[in-house]
Image (cartoon, rainbow, N blue to C red):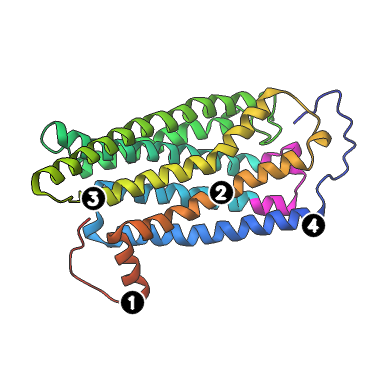
Amino acid sequence: MTLNGNCSWNGSQLWSPQLVLVLGITQITLNILSLVSNGVVIIVILASHDLHHPIFMLFGNLALSDLLSSSSSLWISVLFLAHPDNTIWGSRDLLIPYALFATSILSTIYNLVSIGMERYLMVVGGRLRAPTRVSKRKAVTVVLANWVLAVTLGSLPLLSWNGLDSGCQPSELYGPFCIDYLIFITIPHCVVALALPLFSYLNIVLVLRKQEAAMENHVGGGSRSAEVPVVRTSIAIWLLTLASYVPFFAGVLVDAAGWHCPEDLYPGFFVFRNVTAIMITLNALGNPVLYTLKVKSLSSKFLLLFSGCSSNNQIQM
């Protein structure tokens, strides 16, 4: 990775040991917690036949994306502790974990869009005609398609689209990634992650409110739709992801705005970079908490798992 000709870096280290320990240990701890919690979610969904509905398959796939995000972030954190300056100048050791991290982010976005569309078809489609349920086969197809697209786009830096092999302008935050690659995956996916779920959930909320108002007028009392808890969970997951990923997207845009010398950006800009990774890990850690608190069928399974009990009763969504 080549530096700008106006930069005067002489090879000395920039990161202070104390700052490296604080950031690195924090990231590693959160990543381990996220790995455990998302692993439990995946195990519970796989082991519970009554949870093999399309929406829970999508929730499980989101947990798998979070698992990949946490594992790749853990890898990056270990490299950061071992060679912190490589995260500034860029190195070939970072290519694979960064590619996995990018793949996990893309997969998360596709899963959020898929969850929003599944809820839209379930709630809004059922209002327009016979209930439009997504079959298990279609859900599996969507999951596979999401991963194929995420892996394809996330692997582009490994196919020479990086600052080490192609000679492109490297990213100041995520070297050796090329800045044009980050722009290529950030801007369109940011629009997709915002627009499609927003359209889906706004329509879902309007339909559910009309249904509750109609029931109040018809029977004199409101009756909550069975879809409301899952819809609320889906919206909460989407909002949490937006809040967690906005700093990352903002950092890429600032990165693309102009070239600076690393000495001018340290420590603030690079600490911000590490904080964006922590925010993404917090999102991966927060999703299982939302599953547990808001979806009774999943929370019941968690309780059974941790209490060592077994039950043959079917738990309906």
Are circles 3 and 4 on residues that touch, CB within 8 Å?
Answer: no
Q: What's under tag 1, amino acid-wise?
A: Gly
Identify the residue at horizontal 35%, vertical 35% (top origin): 145
Residue 288 tag number: none
- Name the spot of residue 118 as percent of width and height, x first: 27, 39
Residue 72 tag number: 2
- What is the magenta range? 77-92
Which circle's residue, 2 or 4, is located before the other in the chain? 4
On screen, residue 172 versus residue 228, left or right, reads right
Q: Which residue is tagged 1?
A: 308
Crowding at mark 4 (Cα within 10 Å: few <14, some 14-19, many 20+): few
* Residue situated in front as seen by the camera: 143 or 33: 33
Q: In terms of secondary structure, where does tag 1 sit?
A: loop
Which circle's residue, 4 or 1, is located before the other in the chain? 4
| Gap in angstroms between the C-alphas marked 2 and 1 | 31 Å
Q: Which residue is tagged 4?
A: 18
Crowding at mark 3 (Cα within 10 Å: few <14, some 14-19, many 20+): some
